[in-house]
């Protein structure tokens, strides 16, 4: 049993004190160009450092997308390592968006890369894909419990293609997405104030009242801002589980860079809008 404060507890404290907002760190080529940066390692480093220095002392959560760093090879991964370390040192939690999913020793290796405190990429939580069967995630679940980290499992994603898998109905009459939510509720049973095993649920999906989102764990919700969802949509989409929603905003905040003051103002405005909508 880990003596480290569990991710769910730390996340609840961060959301209550800093506001329920997750800012993506997504340095794709078009955004680097918008910032006047070259699409190379130097541009990547300048972008990442600016975002972290501007926001790490105020936002609850960062969600770096690993692929945008991995595309530059080892030098890009080194930039990611620095961003994760600096963000966590400033008090922000880091959810690594890598969507790893495999079986056996390979899943264990993926978990070790991001959930082992000895790893230079150690993060507070990791996004994972359960579509080799929820049981395939067990190595990640076990290591997360041991290290006090968390997982966000893809359950009801905002991309249209996701529905062909996630809304498919099993022989027992329950959809695949609902089955994933039920697994997570079981992982979080009895945890206070909130469990560490969350789901990824798109904020753009509209009425989700047919799903039990009350999993006693966090719900990472992409789609606020550029994808069309607003803070005001959250209570309607997430119902009684809305207090555990971690809305993710990427382009809506990042488009204001490289101006540090503008980045801070945008993130602050989103956080307050979300706080007000959740409390309403």
Image (cartoon, rainbow, N blue to C red):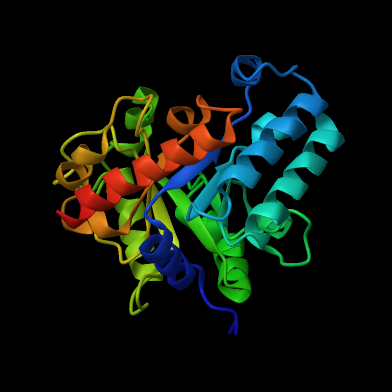
Q: Residue furthest front?
A: 261
Compare residues 229 and 1 and report the one nearer the observer.
229
> Relative to 234, is 142 above or below?
below
> Relative to 215, is 48 above or below?
above
Q: Residue 164: image x %, image y %?
A: 34, 28
Compare residues 56 and 159 and report the one nearer the observer.
56
> Relative to 142, is 159 above or below?
above
Q: Quadrant of residue 185?
A: bottom left
Q: Is residue 68 left or right of residue 199?
A: right
Q: Is residue 217 left or right of residue 151?
A: left
Compare residues 3 and 179 and report the one nearer the observer.
3
Residue shown at the point (17%, 58%) measured from the top left: 240
Residue shown at the point (81%, 27%) measured from the top left: 42
> Relative to 278, is 34 above or below?
above
Residue 237 seen in render:
yes
Q: Residue 205: image x %, image y %?
A: 25, 33
Q: Quadrant of residue 34?
A: top right
Q: Quadrant of residue 222?
A: top left
All told, the count of numbered labels is 0
Q: Residue 5: image x %, image y %?
A: 54, 78
Q: Residue 56: image x %, image y %?
A: 58, 51
Residue 100 seen in render:
no
Q: Quadrant of the N terminus?
A: bottom right
Residue shown at the point (62%, 51%) measured from the top left: 103
Q: Is residue 45 left or right of residue 95?
A: right
Q: Residue furthest right?
A: 74
């Amino acid at each position: 049993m880990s003596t480290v404060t569990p991710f769910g507890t730390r996340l609840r404290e961060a959301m209550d004190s800093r506001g329920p907002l997750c800012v993506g760190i997504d340095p794709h080529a078009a955004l680097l160009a918008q910032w006047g940066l070259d699409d190379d390692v130097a541009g990547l480093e300048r972008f990442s450092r600016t975002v972290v220095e501007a926001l790490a002392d105020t936002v609850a959560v960062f969600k770096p997308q690993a692929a945008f760093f991995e595309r530059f090879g080892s030098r890009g991964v080194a930039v990611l390592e620095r961003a994760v370390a600096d963000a966590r040192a400033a008090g922000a939690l880091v959810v690594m968006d890598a969507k790893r999913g495999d079986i056996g020793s390979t899943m264990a290796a993926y978990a070790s890369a991001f959930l082992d405190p000895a790893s230079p990429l150690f993060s507070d939580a990791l996004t994972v894909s359960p579509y080799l069967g929820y049981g395939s995630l067990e190595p990640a679940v076990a290591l997360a419990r041991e290290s006090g980290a968390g997982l966000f499992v893809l359950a009801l994603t905002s991309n249209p293609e996701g529905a062909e898998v996630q809304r498919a109905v099993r022989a027992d009459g329950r959809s695949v997405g609902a089955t994933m939510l039920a697994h997570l509720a079981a992982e979080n049973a009895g945890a206070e104030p909130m469990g560490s095993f969350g789901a990824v649920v798109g904020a753009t999906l509209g009425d989700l009242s047919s799903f039990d989102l009350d999993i006693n764990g966090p719900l990472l919700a992409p789609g606020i801002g550029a994808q069309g969802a607003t803070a005001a949509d959250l209570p309607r989409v997430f119902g009684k589980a809305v207090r555990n929603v971690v809305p993710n905003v990427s382009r809506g905040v990042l488009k204001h860079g490289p101006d540090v003051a503008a980045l801070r103002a945008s993130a602050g405005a989103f956080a307050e809008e979300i706080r007000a909508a959740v409390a309403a």
